[in-house]
Image (spheres, rainbow, N blue to C red):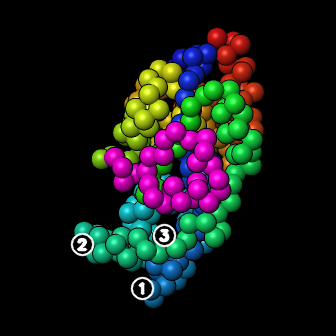
Amino acid sequence: MSRPFRSTKAILFDLDGTLVDSAPDITAAVNELLAGRDLPPLRLEQVKAMIGGGVRKLVERAFAASGAPLLGSALDEANRAMAPIYRRHLTGLTTLMPGVREVLTHFHLSGIAMGVVTNKPQLAAREILLHFGLTDHLGAIVGGDAVTCLKPAPDALLLALDQLQVEPRDALMVGDSGADVAAARAAGMPAILLRGGYTQIAVEALGADLVCDGLLDLPSAMRRLQDAA
């Protein structure tokens, strides 16, 4: 492990695949975009494998998987076309991951500051969190368009911690992918990964400080680490 968790004052959460299961909505958006180009729809599992890296990367991967790869200005145009479609598919099919409300309430009552850092556009992330009534416990919501470089760069994490007024050494990143681990490492903070997210690589192989079965296991896992520190 990179450091003990005894001094954790803030927890940053990824959004897609960590706090919410948004893959069905993202799949609907992708398939609406593809249908407009007379391309066949993709399956949910195909789109799950494309999530991570922001909307532009999602569009690029979707067209490549459809056998119609886009580059340069063509990709720019498809990305612009995706923007309003994406906004129409934020909460219709999206659900909370198990234990979200309980865990956020637990850490809130424990006096730990919390934020969300995601490569999803910031307004989209906020709309989802507002829809589920989660914003009251969050002191920072940082989307991919609020920073210069998306995760795995540390920019979003550092911006969120600045808003929370917590140093990286006193914070923890919770996510579901290698990008979350890499961003945490670059920011100088430990990372916990959850099983059941969207990574196509086994979470045990991604170098996190700890792997949990789900959010409900997070408080007890942190207590065990604190006791061992």
Q: How far is mark 1 from mark 2, CA to CA? A: 16 Å
Whole-percent x and y of residue 80? Answer: 34, 72
Picture disc at residue 73: 2
Taking depth in this image into account, of 54 and 156 the one nearest to the observer is: 156
- Mark 3 or mark 1, earlier in chain: 1
- Mark 3 or mark 2, earlier in chain: 2
Q: Give yes or no for residue 6 being in the magenta stretch.
A: no
Badge 2 crowding class, 10 Å Cα cut-off, few under 14, some 14 to 19, many 20 or more, is: few
Q: Which residue is drawn at the image coordinates 42% and 62% (left, top)?
A: 55
What range is drawn magenta here? 122-147
Q: Name the residue under label 1.
A: 37
- Mark 1 or mark 2, earlier in chain: 1
Q: Which residue lies furthest to the bottom in this view?
A: 38
- Residue 108, placed above or below residue 225: below
Q: Which residue lies furthest to the left in this view?
A: 73
> As drawn, is 64 to the left or to the right of 205?
left
> Is residue 205 at all visible to an observer of this figure?
no
- Residue 177, placed above or below residue 56: above
Q: How far is mark 3 from mark 1, CA to CA? A: 19 Å
Q: Mark 3 points at which residue?
A: 87
Badge 1 crowding class, 10 Å Cα cut-off, few under 14, some 14 to 19, many 20 or more, is: few
Question: Which amino acid, mark 1?
Answer: Arg
Secondary structure mostly seen in the magenta stretch: helix
Residue mark closest to the camera, 3 vs 1 = 3
Taking depth in this image into account, of 71 and 222 the one nearest to the observer is: 222
Q: Which residue is drawn at the image coordinates 38% and 63% (left, top)?
A: 56
Number of numbered discs present?
3
Assign a secondary structure to mark 2.
Answer: helix
Question: Which amino acid, mark 2?
Answer: Ser
Whole-percent x and y of residue 82? Answer: 41, 73
> As drawn, is 112 to the left or to the right of 116?
right
